[in-house]
Amino acid sequence: MAQQEMAVLPQRQAAKYGDRAALKYRDYAKEEWIPISWNEFAHTVRVAANALVALDVAEEENVGIFSQNKPECLATDFAAFANRAVTIPLYATSSPLQVQYIVNDAAIRILFVGEQFQYDAAFSVFGFCETLQQLVIFDRTVQKDPRDQTSVYWDEFLELGKSLAHEALIDERTARGDEHDLMNILYTSGTTGEPKGVMLRHSNYDEIFRTHDDLLSILTDQDVSLDFLPLTHIFEKAWTYFCLRRGVLVCVNLRPSDVQQSLLEVHPTVMCAVPRFWEKIYQGVHERIANESPLRRALMLDALKVGREHNLDYVRLGKVPPLVLRLKYKFYERTVYTLLKKTIGLENGNFFPTAGAAVSDEICEFAHSVGLNMMVGYGLTESTATVSLFPITGFEIGSVGRIIPGLEVKIADNGEILLRGRSITDGYYKKPVSTSEAFEPDGWFHTGDAGYLRGGHLYLTGRIKELFKTSNGKYISPQALETRLAIDRYIDQIAIIADRRKFVSALIVPVYDYVKAYADRKGIPYASMDDLLHHPKIIALFQARIDTLQQQFAHYEQVKRFVLLPRPFSMEQGELTNTLKLRRAVVAEHFKDVIDKLYADAEVEKQS
């Protein structure tokens, strides 16, 4: 059964791999990556499982994990599974109010916390959480509040289980496990409303693992994965579980800002990522090309052209490229492509699952042109991650791949994607109304995403609730525009404004360093960043770039006006979710004056 597989996975893999590394993490004091063998990991899990019993954790009890990515997160997961308990991850960036909500909603008694930020946030709401009794702190350097008389550090927690006194009880619990038991409750950060706890059972994971064993047979125990997206997110969580099942070495990146350094140190062969990661690489490469000498620039652009023709026009379709094209590709592979991939640490790449938002065609084509096998997919927390993904060959640029076997998909009359299958959640924790709203009586789940099927491939067109209707009655997909414009190296963030407006506009957060560099090159004087962002020459720069990128859109869909913002959208301001999705209602509220002025100015100009 699926539960028993996850409950005994560390021990099973330890018997197979012994002292081979299961995980690695960066020791910041020693400035090196420290391996954790399968034997060590399995032993830590077993000790932690005993410690949970010592703290009276019951079967089917909810255990919280509020931390950035750390090996201890995974040890806690598997220790809970061995006890037939449920783990609930909280985003490491969660506010005290978000922590309070989830702890109370899930009646969490024991909460594991990572570093100082998580400890402080959790302790600040301790008194407002009726069920919360114990914090277990992963990081020994955390300074406890002087009033704190109950929290223990990870090493003190492990001491409770060192004698392994509860082995017989743990084995009994594991044996009682059923595939329909809850495994995780994952709270969606939500672009609107309060978080909802998605219930994922062992049977959901069992189905998704079975499917991927066939689809991703190219993944082997020789692969190395860099784990840098939050383990709180279903994409990274399911991927990491899957990698551990397959014996892949998982390198855990603690701090998201360190990912570029980690790539150069770990040299992963596989890694799941979001489109924003690839957008930054794309922008960086094109910035470098733009600054090269005319001869080198021509060479690099030709390399991209050759790579595109070789990999997309032939290899993608299972065709053999012509001899001259093969020879040119091999030349560039030894020079341009290899150098580029080494520069970012991806020279050993096998494949790179990518999801979480729309991927622009340009970025997908770029990745494949230089030999980076970006495997685009689509999924939700409610679908235990994957709904569709690129096949090894025969994928279609612009799509999000083929539907995985065993999952039913249909498109509703309004274009919404509906799902049904064993990998789909059966509902939201303690929210029967939300559950009934999300499911049809015959089991079809409403994703909220719009799309269509063509030739066996799934295409996304936007969010059903995020289709804007202009005052002229035209429908706009803000995500499609944002995805297209965000590939520009001068644009960091963008929010399309159009709902009930006469025309489409945009709030743009520029890449400030690039804007300053441009001003310096052109001799544009400015007293402050705010001053610079209002300069006519900077406005003209962005207008020209936007006009070039949005040519493919209908006239009524195109951005007519925009404002360059002097500060970025942030999670702290509530404008982004924990997964960096835009909270449009919050952005519209926070920048209401800016938006109103933009449309008012347009009206004045029209009348003058």
Image (tube, rainbow, N blue to C red):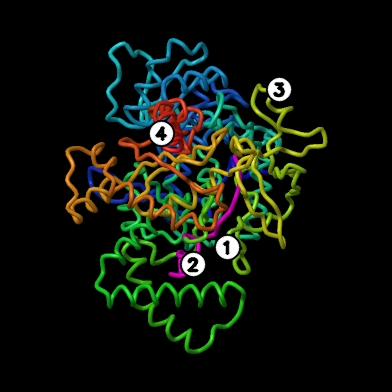
Query: Over which residues does the magenta segment extend?
Result: 363-381
Quarter of the image for the C terminus: give it.
top left
Question: Measured along the vertical axis of the image, is residue 190 above or below residue 361?
Answer: above
The answer to whether marks 3 and 2 mark residues whose Cβ atoms lie closer than 8 Å is: no
The CA distance from mark 4 to mark 1 is 40 Å
Q: Which badge, 4 or 1, is on the more N-terminal residue?
A: 1
Which type of secondary structure does the marked residue at label 1 adopt?
Answer: loop
Residue 505 point in image, percent of width and height: 47, 40
Residue behind mark 2: 368
Which type of secondary structure does the marked residue at label 3 adopt?
Answer: helix
Looking at the rendered structure, the kind of residue marked 3 is Val
Q: Which badge, 4 or 2, is on the more N-terminal residue?
A: 2
Of circles 4 and 3, which is in front?
4
The CA distance from mark 3 to mark 2 is 44 Å
Q: Residues within 10 Å of mark 2 (few under 14, many from 20)?
A: some
Relative depth, front residue between 388 and 124: 388
Residue behind mark 4: 601
Q: Which badge, 4 or 3, is on the more N-terminal residue?
A: 3
